[in-house]
Amino acid sequence: MIKVAIVMGGYSSEYLISLKSGQVVYDQLDRTKYEPYKVHIFKEKWVLVLDNGIEYPIDKNDFSATINGEKITFDVVFNAIHGTPGEDGFLQAYFELIQLPITGCDFYQAALTFNKRDMLSVLKPYGIKTAISYFLNEGDPIIVEEIVNKVGLPCFVKPNRSGSSFGISMVKQSEDLLTAIENAYKEDNEIIIESYLKGTEVSVGVILFKDEIKVLPITEIVSENDFFDYEAKYEGKSQEITPARISKEEQQKVEEIAKRIYKILKMTGFSRSEFILVDGEPFLLEMNTVPGLTAESILPQQARQAQISMAELFDNAITIALNK
């Protein structure tokens, strides 16, 4: 039996979503092959949690737990932590140091893709189209006129390292810019301000499946709100249409670019990239390396459309991690 530690929780605003994703992985894993354990990772505690709610502390020296005098060690870790420390490279580096395989990408890829500014900078020389952007660090002077002259209005103000649309605002008038910047600084001390791209928003899952890079069916996102914010993502204020209602030519372009980005960044495991199609041309917004894994989440929806069950999706991720 392969002992799997499913890590969930995390240190960011996304911890509740991560607990749901982790529970889905726990429920779906094939019990004839795997012995899964839930491990909650929070700033104040790392604990193995049994179904009855009893918690056992994790020994961080070797990532083990002791239950009734018996030491439990794991063969592999399934990463279901959105945001820090599961999506920004910290956990990947820790597990690499203690030589325990973990699903998904390596620590450098996680750190790079979690930092929107750095990822866009790395991809720029490859001709990947992105919005016009302006960077701010906490403490920098805020020159509203300079920002508006560069990115125009409306624009988006985003924390540089955050997920699930926490701290993001759409700014339509220059007098609202300072409030939006303050809001973003609550999530991160680095900010990215981007020009508004008018077009169709699509989400593209690219995964390593049975040792082959596979682009999943594309999802079109239609938000009732100004953009695909937290409410739209998690509270039903959007339609997610898979496959997307785009032309064959647009589909081919997005698929090619999403696959190319995956290869350029030397990705492994799951990835979900967001694009805006402007006059048929895909502009990259961001990439997630630990996307939501609940039944309603976009990547599992896409996998279903590709005739891949959740159990297969998770089994594949573990197999790749063990073979790395």
Image (cartoon, rainbow, N blue to C red):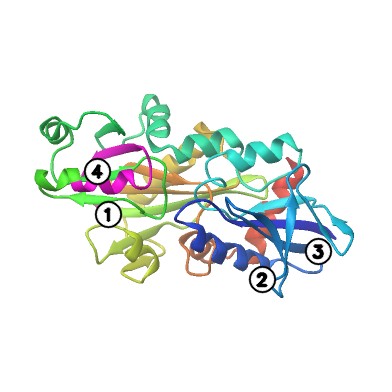
Judge depth for marks 3 and 4 and give the one in front: 4
Residue 111: x percent and y percent? 52, 36
Q: Secondary structure at mark 2?
A: helix
User: How many C-alpha atoms fall within 10 Å of the one at disc 1: few (<14), some, or many (≥20)?
Assistant: some
Q: Give the residue type that dot 3 points to.
A: Lys
Q: Cα distance, mark 1 to mark 3?
A: 42 Å
Q: Nearer the viewer, residue 230 or 60?
A: 60
Q: Which residue is mark 3?
A: 33
> According to the image, label 1 marks what residue?
200
Q: Residue shown at 75%/38% (left/top)?
A: 98
For disc 4, the neighbor class at 10 Å (few under 14, some 14 to 19, many from 20) is many
Q: Residue at x 65, y 59 (%)?
A: 314
Give the labeled residue for mark 2.
27
Which callout, 3 or 2, points to the residue nearer the camera?
2
Q: Nearer the viewer, mark 4 or mark 1?
A: 4
In the rendered view, would you say 211 is above or below 220? above
Query: Nearer the viewer's eye, disc 1 or disc 3?
Result: 3
